[in-house]
Image (cartoon, rainbow, N blue to C red):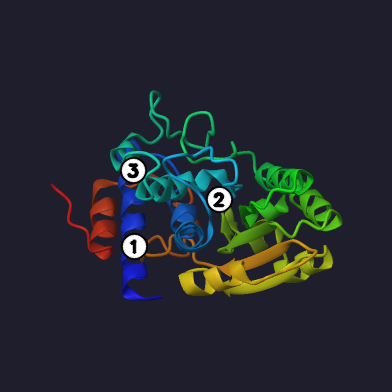
Amino acid sequence: MNSEQNAKAKQIRADILKSLYACQSGHPGGSLSCVEILLALYNNVMKYDSKNPQMEDRDRFVLSKGHACPTLYAVLADKGFFPKEDLQHLRQADSHLQGHPDMTKTPGVDCNTGSLGQGVAIAGGMALAAKYKKADYKVYALIGDGEMQEGLVWEAAMSAAHYKLDNLTVLLDFNHLQIDGSNDQVMSVGDPMEKYRAFGFECLEVDGHDIDAITEAIKKPVVGKPKFICCHTHKGHGVSFMEDNHGWHGKPMSKDDFAAAMKELGVEIDG
């Protein structure tokens, strides 16, 4: 990852943590783990117009792990869908940036998500609709590894393969942790590559913190089947005391936590 990409990833992480600190709630761990995945999509792959969020032929993105919306919001603000200042109103009653994505409130959000497993199923429906309409837009869905424990994820996978949805890409934020501990402790998800391959997907795996590698995998041509990309990540990536620590799944930051995190990201703060 080049220096410009690294700087952008750090900026997005700082924006995420600023918004989470301001509201004293939310999900830092899983938000930090998927930064590079969203940057690869929005900077290098997806077709969209921030001034016309409902552009008919835009590519669609579904954040199936909806609790990681601070990352989506930070990226959308960075791309000009709404003012960056709005990020400081995350999770406030009168804000358009709620604790899970809401397409009726936030420009650039294509799907309401929050109930795990549902987003990736909806993404499959979007991709199938594109096939019926003979539209050329593509659909990308990001799921979490804890989310893979939901049965609906596998119904969606079976459906996507059956309908040969080669316009659908499912990306996994594989950080091995969820709210109560490791995936293996809670309910092992096994080998995601092996599982998705068995369901009929074209399967690739990458370093989920390498924007170039993610971009290359997303752009790899596939015909006649959906694509699955296993992105190996670290929960809380970019902040040493949060990294690989499930305790930071949904923990608010103290003033000292916030200052330490900003220092690691090279961001000066007041106070």
Horizontal side of 65 relative to 211 (left or right) equals right
SS class, disc 2: loop
**Hey, which quadrant is residue 21 in on the image?**
top left
Question: Marks 3 and 2, how far apart in space?
Answer: 20 Å
Which residue appears farthest toward the right when viewing the image?
162
Given the image, on which type of amino acid does mark 2 rest? Ile
Horizontal side of 170 relative to 36 (left or right) equals right
**Hey, which quadrant is residue 148 in on the image?**
bottom right
Residue at 59% from the left image edge and 39% from the top image edge: 111
Mark 2 or mark 1, whichever is nearer to me: 1
The mark that comes first in sequence, 2 or 1, is 1
Which residue appears farthest toward the left when viewing the image?
271
Residue at 58% from the left image edge and 50% from the top image edge: 59
Given the image, on which type of amino acid does mark 1 rest? Lys
Residue at 40% from the left image edge and 42% from the top image edge: 81
| Residue on which disc 3 sits | 19
Question: Marks 2 and 1, how far apart in space?
Answer: 28 Å
Q: Position of residue 233 (x, y in %)?
A: 52, 67
| Residue on which disc 2 sits | 179
Question: Marks 1 and 3, how far apart in space?
Answer: 17 Å
Q: Position of residue 182 (x, y in %)?
A: 59, 61
Mark 1 or mark 3, whichever is nearer to me: 1
